[in-house]
Image (cartoon, rainbow, N blue to C red):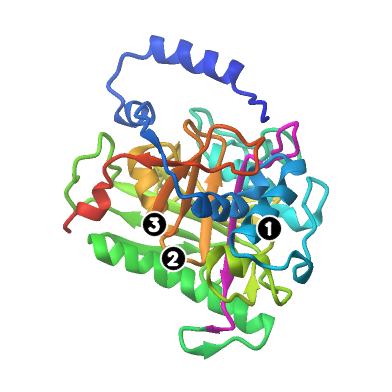
Amino acid sequence: MKLRFSIITGMVFLITACANTEPNPYRDAKRINPDRVKFADKALTHELSYLAQAMMESDRRQEAVEKLLTDIKADPSAYTYKPKNKNDSSYGMQAKVGTDLLLGNLGSDLGGKVGGVIAAGEVLYKGYQMFRDDSMARTSQAFLPAIFDGVELKTAEQANKALLTFTDNLIMSISSKHGWHTQCIDGCGTPQSSYLISLKETKNPGYAYYPQDVVLVLDIGEVKKFPIPNVLSLATQTPLKWGTQLGDTYLIHAYSGVIYDEAGKVELRYSDKYKRNFPSATDPLVDTPFGRDLSAEIHSTPYTYFGTQDTYPDQFFYRGKKYSFNLNSIPEMIKYELQEPNLLQAKKP
């Protein structure tokens, strides 16, 4: 079972919250917790739990695979599988970057600012953000079939380029759908890019907190060829050939409270540790209603997912839906759907 490291953080937040009586829509939005409704579809539980296995206790991951294979009456001997642990290199640098991006911690090598400004650069708990049961605090991944958008992906170079194009098109499509203005502001066309989304000209569809500006910070892992056959194809019910590795390798994190320089451009700060620029902002959106709805839209296809144990309730996004779980110590981990109005789906530009 995961052990959280939030007692001191919670005490600090409580003290500062009591001392600060100024209206704060962002803070209020973070306190809005959706209901969790248990669903009865065992096959869906096995599919989602397999995908979210990096957040599961390491000694339960093999059981998650076996339950998935049993559902579809597949021969386990046809599928190679090795449970991952925190020492496995496939978790990669994205696991470390992900801690910073999601929690919004400012590191000393970024020339610290007061006031909780995020340069999204340094790790809170030096190294991997792992719980004591070897589960990851968050997970993300992307994968592609052999033929994608009508093009056969024959090489890793083609597959990596296809994923970057898919991601850029996805962000621009979501923005266009809602009448937002979006531009890439750094690292454009690379796996480590940043986007600025302006929502100023659109009406708040009813959120307790609807930011005027949002920055998206991306860190996408290297795409490699999967073994054929592979369990992921069974879990997603899609024939897959390419993808990033298991861990936290398809990061798209959203922040509001964007900070601009004197020229009116988003302030960018360079991280010596990660060898990239990070935009400055103050407020991670992942545990606000708007942020959850945005994550659901970003992960609305069969090709990507994102999950986190750093929020309450725990979250997992896949195929446009929001899921949750109580325990990560069981192979049938994801049993709940988050119930709250998706105001972006109902919104008209």
Q: Amino acid at mark 1?
A: Leu
Q: Nearer the viewer, residue 259 or 4?
A: 4
Q: Residue at x 25, y 34 (%)?
A: 208
Q: Residues within 10 Å of mark 3 (few under 14, many from 20)?
A: some
Marker count (numbered): 3
From where the camera sits, is residue 252 visible?
no
What residue is shown with label 2? 301
Q: Secondary structure at mark 3?
A: loop
Q: Residue at x 16, y 49 (%)?
A: 203
Q: Quadrant of the N terminus?
A: top right
Task: Report how far apart the C-alphas of labels 2 and 3 lie in the structure.
Answer: 7 Å
Task: Report how far apart the C-alphas of labels 3 and 1 lie in the structure.
Answer: 20 Å
Q: Amino acid at mark 2?
A: Thr
Residue 31 position in % (x across, y down):
37, 26
Residue 48 position in % (x across, y down):
54, 52
- Which of the numbered marks, if any, corresponds to residue 320? 3
* Mark 2 vs 3, N-terminal side: 2
What residue is shown with label 1? 246
Residue 260 position in % (x across, y down):
40, 47
